[in-house]
Amino acid sequence: MYTGFNLRLDETASIFGELKNYMRLQKIGETHLSNQKANYEKDLKKYVRQKEIDGTKIQNEWFPQINADIFISHSHKDKELACAFAGWINEKFGLKCFIDSIVWGYSNELLDEMNSRLSNKRKDDNGGYLYEHQSCNQVSQHVNTMLSIALQKMIDKVEAVIFINTDNTVKVCSDTRMEKTYSPWIYSEIICTQFVRKKPLLAYRDYKSENKTYMGVFESMQFAMHTDISYIVSLKHLKTMGEEDLIQWEKEYSLNGANYEYALDALYKFMRPNEVESTRKLFSVLEDGEIKTLQHAYSTQDTEAEEWEDMQYVWNCIIQRCILCCQECDRYRKALNE
């Protein structure tokens, strides 16, 4: 993840136009990643390995990591809005947006399948089944963990995260004025954006090549509860974004699209000024081997802690070398000293 945005948006936004166009954009949002939809096998026998179930294989097939540019975090109640927004982004900028329920399906299906196969059960008087609480709880823990890890990996992989902030996702406490959410998945995603490794823009760019390469929520698990559980969240680390910013992004790209190899650069021009220019400067002073090494290191998700520290050390050394040898890098020297 390079950056994240906190976006206030609803279905009446002018970018969507009339209802007919809103529904058309929904369809685009639902289908533009259809070729990367999860292709999973419901027969759990496929995942049995030496009398035990291969949880890693289930996670990789039910919740696969796909190529996308933007992770859209949203409430399940705002699924149509998220799809329309993804369709708008794809149509205007050619970017791919990840929406978990569209690409992965619903984790309840996996939960039901695993419970039916693994949990202790007995028939009830109505012809259905009663499941033992302890075994069901154990299965639920596994499915939730698979989903949570898969979501964290996707957030780490994409370039940008856009959190659609509506009354369905975050509310303000009347007494403390602090923001809170009742969704454990929204809570998990927001916290993840706080602590996931922040990659430099260089990890997602290849300004020296003519070929574009992008390195490029499950809100479906709803449980009937008599008591709501809320979580205090902070959105301060996400850059505030409004509809006017989306309009400016579209305008900038439509007028000067030929000047942008990457559509998100048109957004960063005014949301994160100087970032693109700074990254281009790095490309002018770094050697190709150094760039490829850094990009590979940032793209892998299996890096051990010691390897990650080594990579950070190498990155710092490279930046310092650039600072020492490049007279035009005063701002890098200043940033490093600070």
Image (spheres, rainbow, N blue to C red):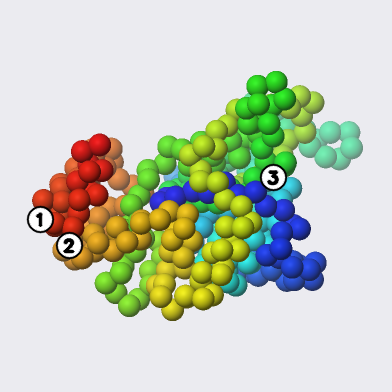
Q: Which mark is residue 166?
A: 3
Who's the residue at 15% across and 48% down the image? Answer: 320
Q: In x, y percent, where is residue 57? A: 47, 51
Lateral position of residue 72 relative to residue 318, left or right: right
Q: Rate crowding at label 2 as few (under 14), some (14 to 19) or many (20 or more) other CA atoms within 10 Å.
A: some
Lateral position of residue 153 relative to residue 136, left or right: left
Which residue carries the number 2 mark? 285
Q: CA distance from mark 2 to mark 3?
A: 43 Å
Count of all numbered marks drawn on residues in the image: 3
Contact? badges 1 and 2 (CB < 8 Å): yes
Q: Residue 110 versus residue 51: which sits nearer the camera?
A: 110
Lateral position of residue 184 relative to residue 150, left or right: right
Q: In x, y percent, where is residue 226? A: 79, 26
Q: Amino acid at mark 3?
A: Thr
Q: In x, y percent, where is residue 126? A: 89, 37
- Above or below: residue 141 compared with residue 11: above
Q: Which mark is residue 325?
A: 1
Which quadrant of the rendered structure holds the C terminus?
top left
Lateral position of residue 76 relative to residue 272, left or right: right
- Above or below: residue 174 compared with residue 308: above
Q: Which mark is residue 59?
A: none
Q: Earlier in the sequence, mark 3 or mark 1?
A: 3
Q: Secondary structure at mark 2?
A: helix
Q: In x, y percent, where is residue 285? A: 17, 62
- Above or below: residue 30 compared with residue 192: below
Q: CA distance from mark 3 to mark 1?
A: 48 Å
Residue 137 appears in view: no
Q: Earlier in the sequence, mark 2 or mark 3?
A: 3
Q: Rate crowding at label 1 as few (under 14), some (14 to 19) or many (20 or more) other CA atoms within 10 Å.
A: few
